[in-house]
Amino acid sequence: MKIAFSKPTRDEEELATLLTGYRAEGYEGLQLKMGQFLPFVDDAEGFRSRWGDDPGTVSGLIFFDDLSDGGKERLQATIDFAGAVGAERVIFCHNRDREGVTPEVLRGFAGTLADYAQRAGDRGVRFSLHHHYGQPVMLPDDVEEFFGAADGRIGLTVDTAHLAKSGIEDIPGFLSRFADIVDNIHLKDYAGGEWRLLGEGELDLTGILGQLRSQGFQDWLCVDEESAAPCRSACASRAPGSTRTSEPSAPPLINDEGEPMSLRSGRTRARVLALGAAAAVAAVLTACSPGGAGGGAASEAPKDGKVTLTWWDYYAPGATEDALLGLLDKYQKENPNVTVERQFIAYEDLKKNLLQSAGAAALPDIVVINGPDHAQFAELGIAADLTDKLKEWGELDKYPKGVIQSSSLNGKNYGVPITANCLALFYNKALLADAGLKPPTTWDELESTAKALTTPDHYGFAYSAINNQQAVFQWLPTLWQAGGDLTKLDSPQAATALEYWSGLMQDGSVSREALNWDQAAVASEFAQGRAAMMINGPWQLPFLAKEAPNLDYGVALLPAGKEKASALGGENYMIVDGPHTDAAWDLVKWMQKPENVEALAAGSGSLPTRTDVDPFTDDANIAVFADELKVARPRAYGANYAEIADQVVAAIQSVLTGSSDAKSALGTAATAVKPLLPKG
């Protein structure tokens, strides 16, 4: 067996120590987390220049993503990078919930990944699938089904802790059963639902390693250190039956009786990189700091009582950002021991950055996240479970049940709703009056009104059909109004809804530039008089007040089809499971004080989620949105909503560009979406 090491790093210093010091600690290779190599994925030469050409440094690249179009592009880029830097293998973690995955779907995944494995093989790179709790290939039957269709091109990376968490007690038996395909081992301990340092959990590590030796396993045994213990503590993990490739830089971490030491004994190596080395013994020797509960990176509490919280949101410059910054500044003045480092992350980059930062253990403490995306990060273990804190807080009865559900998963709560919103129809009063028209109330009226208002100077109507979730959010009311749903994309009602949208563009009432417009761009078109009507949300009200103060406009309920419907939107505070959960919760609680909720809602133009706050008592436009909320529906499609939305927006764009008809495009999307939908 070849012995490797893998652990998230929190900063550049730890990464440098890891990449330059692993051999001195007795390891022959590293298996890098995604965030450790991804910054160089398009710059292989830069990686070699920075970290050298030692092939052990890249013995494995752990890639965590889905199989959406974007995920496939990133996987291909990783394979190309692996070939360029001489990496031995790419280890694929499938960021996809296993719920609803059928044997047929598993075989489809196998075919897709076998193709990428072939591409990797063409670059001299091996390809391995990481067995992972909660992902499609988890149980023995999954392994049989998947690898039976993989055509021998993919290996299996077995993670001992993930097997245990999946309920598999006989890990040596699992290894024996799948000996022909197991080509990589991630060895970590497990107990009480948490990753543990080797020797501090409940797994029979000696039995596991004995089984590997008995079956002649010759590939990588990677000490995959993902417990809460930080690199900066003296943390040594050793695998029995392994051998050193060099002398250790410090004595083995055992006491005079040959027993493992812990930090609690006070006899440790206080070094940034105390990775440990492999000793030829028949037991696991461990020395580590006591880790905290939860899945986030741990850190020592600051001795001076001060804490720095990292805050991510996607509020671009404008009224919402101004309101937020004012509140954060006020909190820091009231709490001088807390520093809040706020970072703007573009909406379309937020999820990707969270996933990448999780791989590098560089997550923020608080995230403003789109409601439908919250469940995914709860399921991945990134979001902290706030159920007990919210119960102790005692103010959940101030929030409607529907908005609370946006931050809930499996009966537990992982966040606090910030604002709620929905979509309505904005209209230019002067343009409608000049044409002798009234705001439309039905589909037919919208179609005829938009056509009548279309001139060389302006389009009659505007919506966002951009290639991201915003297009789906904007189209959903039309889908629901037609009597359709994302669960029935191959229905006549869904085709009718998409044909209606397409017809508005085909007759010239909507600009083809809508394919590139996000909702902010749509508002800009309306503000500048280039669109007579638009579909948009209350967050645009402050924008219009600032950028078009003389624009005479009104807001009306969305024109109805067979049914009345709008899409419920909003954002949540998500606290990342980590060392600052309590401090982050204190800030979130403060932000949810009625006066602070009112200030942020007034700045953002969104409706506050607290029922005891109403900053818009005299605003007629907000009153329309309040009425629209009565028929607004949540995007309650489970943890895979983002992948579902990817398929839907692909269908929308293919129809609007004329490359497909609605029935065909939605039929394709329906097939892809079916296994992604929650059961029941």
Image (cartoon, helix red, strand yellow):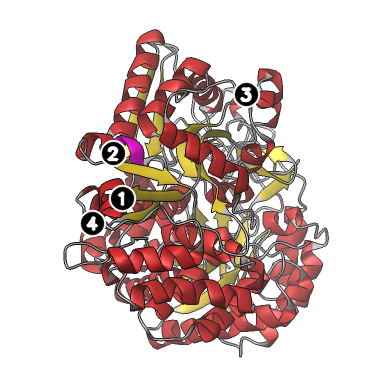
The mark lying in front, picked from 4 and 3, is 4
Q: Position of residue 475 (x, y in %)?
A: 48, 63
Count of number-bearing discs: 4
Tag 3, which secondary structure? helix
Q: Is residue 466 visible?
A: no
Q: CA distance from mark 4 to mark 3?
A: 38 Å
The mark lying in front, picked from 2 and 3, is 2
Quarter of the view holding residue 86: bottom left
Residue drawn at point x = 52 percent, y = 66 percent: 66
Could you say which disc has been placed on residue 265 in the image?
3
Q: Nearer the viewer, residue 572 or 389?
A: 572
Q: CA distance from mark 3 to mark 1?
A: 58 Å
Which amino acid type is marked by label 4? Arg
Using residue 214 as the reference point, say whether residue 428 is left or right of it. Answer: left
Range covered by the magenta-colored residues: 540-544
Task: Kindly identify which residue carries mark 2.
Answer: 543
Tag 2, which secondary structure? helix
Q: Are marks 4 and 1 in contact (CB under 8 Å)?
A: no
Tag 4, which secondary structure? helix
Q: CA distance from mark 2 to mark 1?
A: 9 Å
Could you say which disc has been placed on residue 50 in the image?
4
Q: Are marks 2 and 1 in contact (CB under 8 Å)?
A: yes
Q: Nearer the viewer, residue 475 or 146?
A: 475
Which badge, 4 or 1, is on the more N-terminal residue? 4
Task: Kindly identify which residue carries mark 1.
Answer: 520
Q: CA distance from mark 4 to mark 2?
A: 45 Å
Which badge, 2 or 3, is on the more N-terminal residue? 3
